[in-house]
Image (cartoon, grey):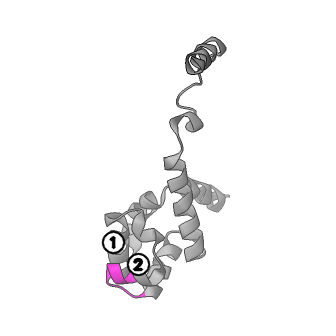
Amino acid sequence: MQDEIAEEAAASLTIAQRVKGARDRLRPSERRAAQALLYDYPYTGLLTTGEFARRAGVSAPTILRLVTQLGFGSYRDFQRRLKGELAEQMQSPLAKGSISPPDTRERSRLHDFGAG
């Protein structure tokens, strides 16, 4: 039961939040990889493991260990989540629901304005 709660809590965190929360339990090489990720977040996480490793000055297996420490089953899962975060950030405010659409009369006036 507590494991399920912990998994749900971790699932709601961004990757950057997961990295910050995991710092104390990471090996020094994993910490370097984490710092490289945060330095150019989220771009570095979208690179191949080899390119990510080169930027961080660590090995590709270190990158894989890092994503495992962050709770991902694979690098592909890590990148999927990162891409999902990006997609969410790029949604328009209207799609996010932070701005309500104009009421019917307002839409009618906008339509009439565009027709003129």
Find residue 104 and report its image quarter.
top right
- Residue 82 location (% of width, % of height): 52, 62
Provide the residue designation for mark 1.
36
Circle 2 residues within 10 Å: few <14, some 14–19, many ≥20: many
Q: Amino acid at mark 1?
A: Ala
Q: Amino acid at mark 2?
A: Phe
Find residue 11 and report its image quarter.
bottom right
Q: Is residue 92 above or below residue 37?
A: above
Secondary structure at numbered mark 1: helix
Q: Residue at the far front: name it.
A: 116
Whether 57 is among the magenta residues is yes
Question: What are the residue bounds of the magenta stretch?
Answer: 53-59
- Residue 45 location (% of width, % of height): 45, 69
Left or right? Give the position of 95 relative to 16. Answer: right
Dot 2 and dot 1 residues touching (CB under 8 Å): yes
Of residue 71 and residue 91, the one placed in the foreground of this image is 91
Numbered-mark total: 2
Quadrant (top left, top right, bottom left, bottom right) of the N terminus:
bottom right
